[in-house]
Image: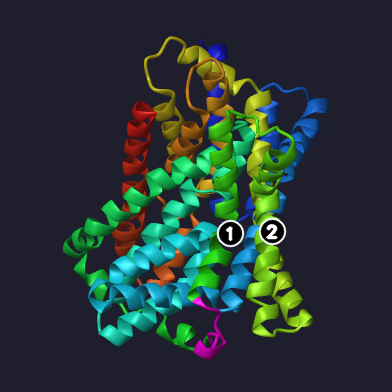
Amino acid sequence: MLEEIWPLISVVIGVIVLLILIIGFKLNTFISLIVTSMFTGIILGIPIDNIVETVEKGMGDTLGSIAIIFGFGSILGKLLSDGGGATRIADKLIETFGEKYVNWAMLIASFIIGISLFLEVAFVLLIPLVFTLAKRMNISNLKVGLPMTISIAITHGFLPPHPGPVAVAQALNANIGHVLMYGIIIGLPLALIVGAFFTNIVYKIVPSAFAREGKQVSVEEDKPVAVKDRPSFGLSLLTALSPIILMLLATIIQLITGHEDGKAGGFEGFIYFIGSSTTAMLIAVLIAIYTMGIRRKKSTDQIMATISNAITPIAMLLLIIGGGGVFKQVIIDGGVGDTISKIFHGTEMSPIILAWLATAILRLALGSSTVSALSSVGIVLPLIQSMDVNISLIVLAIGAGSVFFSHVNDAGFWMFKEYFGLTMKETFLTWTLLESVLSVLGLGFILILDVVI
């Protein structure tokens, strides 16, 4: 009996070791992931002379498929930020909706901006606007900030080109265009529904959080792009959404022609080429270099400085993502997925629910949404290979699980807490509760979509 479930016990031991290294010894997350992966590989019974090969394969397969997209995404976000395009989009929407509905304006603006920006980048970019609007209208920072957080959390968990959905889609060989399309179908109503009730409910639960001033001083020291120097709303919107437009175009053509593998010649082949995630992100960056740089009369040195500043901060994050891929590969090579497959053989549990559950448990243990999403792939992959299931929905289920119950081992938890000046209790009752609500409701929408399609 012990021999049969030993792979599962090994993973639990590995997760405990990882937590001890990160939390107890304060060891760097990337180093901890590699050490834990090697240790877990040994106790799983992987031959010693194969462990390094497994580590290299996990790192190479993971970064080889997402490093370019991740790098281009960071560059695009920084160009939009430094060029004033992101602020222009937000200002225009707020102007359109009016002060009375500023929460809806922030929700929609953040969703649009969040599609192209990573969560941390979008958060830092939008927080000055949150504080400025709250001060102008004499309302709580959190009342404006929660709608913003709802949108960027959804885009981070559900939509390419964010690293989690992209990495999982690549690992499961899912069509990224389909993941994006279904993600928007789920993400938009999720944002609108949660945005409609969550802030009022949280205010009743923890009103003290809405009295906090947050880090106003640090925000006021920022120097935003002058209004006269910002690009137009249309140009800013086109730049931010250009990769999404290209990827969705290719997906629509695929659905019309039936070429699900994305292989064709002539003009159709060209559409698939520019609609691939890598090419689409490259084109978007080139567009942003012109619209947010050259057109703004910035020098080449200034534009290249922006690009360099975008890349430097993500170096460690890329390694951490690669480390998550290594852990995933160890789980696969160690036969953990096969063990779980045997346990669930003949089960009536939906593979979508199983994918969400596995990722949610890993999210609780590991903290990082991207690492937990990647690590869960090794568990669910053997199961879905023998089942008739929409792989794109499995990717989204993993994405939903990856945002479940963010707490002290997640960087986003501390970012939210510090910027809004909250106590630990208040952060759990705002940020952590929000992430959990999005995760569970997201799973519900995915199950509904699975029935519909």
Q: Main SS type for the magenta part?
A: loop
Image quarter for residue 386? Answer: top right
Q: Residue furthest front?
A: 267
Please name the amino acid that badge 1 sits on.
Ser
**Relative side of 362 to 445, left or right:** right
How busy is the neighbourhood of tag 1: few (under 14 within 10 Å), some, or many (20 plus)? many
Q: Residue at x 62, y 70 (%)?
A: 78
Quadrant housing the C terminus: top left
x, y percent for residue 332: 64, 26
> Does residue 424 appear anywhere in the picture?
yes
Residue 225 lies in the magenta-colored region = yes
Image quarter for residue 136? Answer: bottom left
Pointer 1 or 2: first along the chain: 1
In the rendered image, the vertical position of residue 282 relative to residue 258, given as above or below: below
Q: Residue at x 55, y 53 (%)?
A: 244
Please name the amino acid that badge 2 sits on.
Ile
Q: CA distance from mark 1 to mark 2?
A: 8 Å
Q: Judging from the image, what secondary structure is the residue with disc 2 in?
A: helix
In the rendered image, the vertical position of residue 332 relative to residue 141, given as above or below: above
Q: Nearer the viewer, residue 114 or 8?
A: 114
Q: Which residue is mark 2?
A: 283
x, y percent for residue 53: 80, 32
x, y percent for residue 201: 19, 58
Image quarter for residue 109? Answer: bottom left
Q: Which residue is mark 1?
A: 242
Q: Is there CB contact under 8 Å for labels 1 and 2?
A: yes
Residue 196 lies in the magenta-colored region = no
Q: Residue at x 71, y 33 (%)?
A: 264
Display coloring: rainbow
Q: Which residues are magenta?
A: 223-232
How many discs mark residues in the rendered view?
2
x, y percent for residue 144: 32, 72
